[in-house]
Image: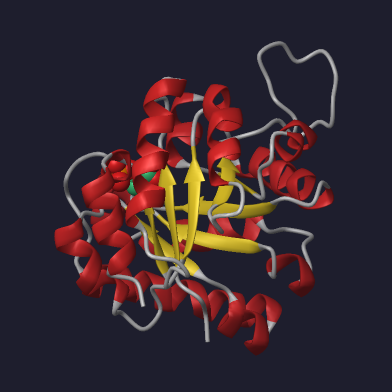
Amino acid sequence: MRRPIIAGNWKMNLLRSEARDLVESLIRRVKTPASADIILAPPFTALGAVEELIAGTGFFLAGQNHHFEPKGAYTGEVSPAMLKDAGCQYVILGHSERRTYFFEDDAQINKKIKAALLCGLNVIFCVGETLEQREKGETQSIIQSQIEKGLQGLTGNDIGRIVLAYEPVWAIGTGKTATPDQAQEVHFFIRGLLREIFGEIVAQNTRIQYGGSVTPESSGSLLTQKDIDGALVGSASLNTDSFCAIISSAH
Ligand code: PEP
């Protein structure tokens, strides 16, 4: 049985006081033990404030990115050990906004994943196709290439600490959600790929989240799909009502 996993990616939003307000209201509203693992990914500046509040609640903390080097002259960057030190158990890597706006390629993402694992962080590894790629019928080949390159050199044991997130680029922040059938088709494909590369047990145990404009209205039908094990939520995670409703739709 794969435990559902719901993550809130706050992106570059919320000052510390706003982060505290949101987390306090989530803690009041989410019934524990929750029916899913709940992960909060605040911006770096709010990690400390969120960490203090979620201590003992069972919520997990995630960074939104880190550098692949352990330390050094990389002005403006943060290392995996720094995220660990700030209380993170997870990091989001390969997000399409990092790929698009910061030109991260598969080789860099692979280095980042290895650096995260070496440091004891779990990884939410994002993959997804653009609208143009989908329309050209390239969805599966793009996902396959991102997964093969992103996970190159990793073992089945390593995959035990990785959550896959299928995030069609055309659905992120656009209000366009993939239909449950569209999402399930790609999740099924990803699980098959994991089976081919790492074997049946890894394929069955790996959690695959869907992300892309998930709302309380769409989460129920997405999360009941056989191969969808959770959601990576952007804008709807900034609102207590909508994030709590999405969490409740995970069983
Ligand atoms: C995301 O940031 O990963 C995301 C899916 O954002 P949104 O839910 O806003 O589309």
Quarter of the rendering containing residue 83 = top right
Q: Is residue 169 visible?
A: no
Q: How many labels does the image show?
A: 0
Q: Where is residue 100 in the image (x, y as percent from the top left)?
A: 44, 31
- Front residue of 130 and 245: 245
Q: Where is residue 123 in the image (x, y as percent from the top left)?
A: 63, 53
- Front residue of 69 and 80: 80
Q: Would residue 217 be found to the left or right of residue 146 on screen?
A: left
Residue in the picture at 83% in, 50% down: 118
Quarter of the rendering containing residue 106 = top right
Residue in the picture at 50% in, 35% down: 99
The colour mode here is secondary structure
Q: Would residue 19 be found to the left or right of residue 25 on screen?
A: right
Residue in the picture at 77% in, 62% down: 154
Q: Quadrant of the C terminus?
A: bottom left
Residue in the picture at 53% in, 62% down: 164
| Vertical position of residue 176 compared to residue 77: above or below | below
- In this view, which residue lies farthest toward the front? 28
Q: Where is residue 45 in the image (x, y as percent from the top left)?
A: 55, 22
| Vertical position of residue 16 compared to residue 233: above or below | above
The quarter of the image that holds ligand 1 is: top left
Q: Would residue 124 be found to the left or right of residue 166 on screen?
A: right
Q: Position of residue 35 (x, y in %)?
A: 42, 73
Q: Is residue 41 visible?
A: yes
